[in-house]
Image: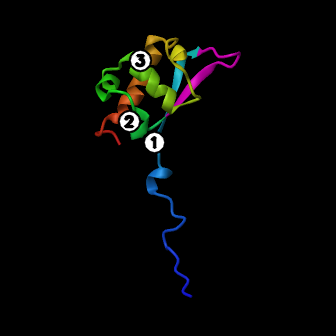
Amino acid sequence: MSNNTDNNAGNKPEHATTARLKTITLSQPIARDGNDITQLTLREPRAGDLRGLKLLDVFQLDIDAVAVLLSRIATPSIIASEVNQFSLTDLQRVSEGLVGFLDSSEG
């Protein structure tokens, strides 16, 4: 019997460990059961994170599209009603972070 091993077995695809992250400090914390959210860490969206969304809506910063996408890529996880609590300054900061991931000139 020959022992045929795959030299690539156990190797992870490069993209699995190199996701870009952006941390946004909120100017006005979001209240959540006594634990205020003061920062959000955004993970670079993957194709599946955009499922059901129109990319144009995300680029145009449609609040509903932004809320759905944030619920999929933000840590701590947030929901739409929490996104609705963002100050305009925080909404702008978070939205710029999102669009930065989608802008191919950033990298």
Residue 55, image quadrant: top left
Above or below 104: residue 55? above
Q: Earlier in the sequence, mark 3 or mark 1?
A: 1
Foreground: 60 or 65? 65
Residue type pointed to by label 1: Arg
Dividing the image into 4 quarters, which one contains the C terminus?
A: top left
Q: Secondary structure at mark 2?
A: helix
Residue at 46 percent across and 57 percent down: it is 13
Q: Residue at x 55, y 65 (%)?
A: 10
Question: For the magenta stretch, what is the residue range?
Answer: 30-42
12 relative position to 51: left or right: right
Do the residues bearing badges 3 and 2 touch, measured as CB atoms within 8 Å?
no
Residue under circle 3?
A: 64
Classify 63 as above or below 4.
Answer: above
Q: Are marks 1 and 2 in contact (CB under 8 Å)?
A: yes
Rendering coords of residue 62 (x, y %)? 36, 18
Q: Is residue 78 part of the magenta span, yes or no?
A: no
- Mark 3 or mark 2: name the one nearer the start of the chain: 3
Per the image, label 3 sits on a secondary structure element best described as helix
Q: Residues within 10 Å of mark 1 (few under 14, many from 20)?
A: few
* Residue underneath mark 2: 101
Q: Position of residue 67 (x, y in %)?
A: 46, 21
| Amino acid bearing label 3 | Asp
Closer to the camera: disc 3 or disc 1?
A: 3
Q: Nearer the viewer, mark 3 or mark 2?
A: 3
Query: Residue 89 location, x and y as percent?
Result: 44, 14
In terms of depth relative to the viewer, which is nearer, 81 or 106? 81
Q: Residue at x 50, y 31 (%)?
A: 72
Question: In the image, which disc is placed on residue 20?
Answer: 1
